Image: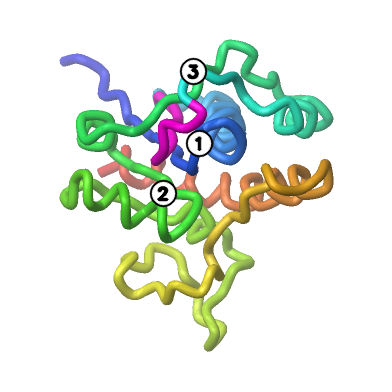
Amino acid sequence: MFPVTYRVMTVCTGNICRSPMAEIVLRRHFEAAGLDVVVDSSGVSDEEHGNPIDDRAGVALARRGYTAGNNHVARRATATDVGSRDLVLAMTARHARHLRALDPTVDVRLYRSFDPAVTAHDDAPLRDTPLGDVPFDGLLDIADPWYGGPDDFETCLDQIEAGADGVLAHVRAALAN
């Protein structure tokens, strides 16, 4: 019997900030846990196609000891990409809607829904909430740091790291089934 490899894709707008940062953070978490998980990233737009990771994202990652993804090349998510992943993690509700339109059968989740500190308006946990039940109020969106300065990239990385253990637990449970 061949080993099963679980595939995760993180997705943002242009694939130069949030999604490659999440890819790098998750890859480290899965490797540290000894899980056979392939992680990659893409964007919903092709406006940054072929570009490397944003320098400011690389600096934020390096400050925390991550390898900044010097080989990263931005690309747009396709229906084939989405359909071949076990879990697709969108950075915003808008991204998730775009991805669901590409393939409605794929497990698309908002990345921050795995952050145990993020709660709904009634303080109920949002973990594993179907996207259709999540209000489009930005509560679960990871803001685009591209428009800001170094602090915005640090905040983005804080949010990504805060959800990483929840993603790890979700994938671990999926692999156990």
Query: Label 3 is placed on what type of residue?
Result: Gly
Instruction: Answer whether residue 117 is magenta in the image.
Output: no
Picture coordinates of residue 54, whole percent (x, y): 67, 28
Q: Which residue corresponds to mark 1?
A: 14
| Element assignment for label 1 | loop
Disc 2 to disc 3, how far (Cα)? Answer: 31 Å
| Element assignment for label 2 | helix
Residue at 62% x, 18% y is 69
Q: Residue 82 versus residue 66: which sits nearer the camera?
A: 82
Q: Which residue corresponds to mark 2?
A: 170
Q: Which residue corresponds to mark 3?
A: 50
Query: Label 1 is placed on what type of residue?
Result: Gly
Compared across the picture, whether 168 is left or right of 3 comes to: right
- Pointer 2 with pointer 3, Cβ within 8 A: no
Instruction: Write down the region rendered in magenta.
Output: 38-48
Colour pattern: rainbow
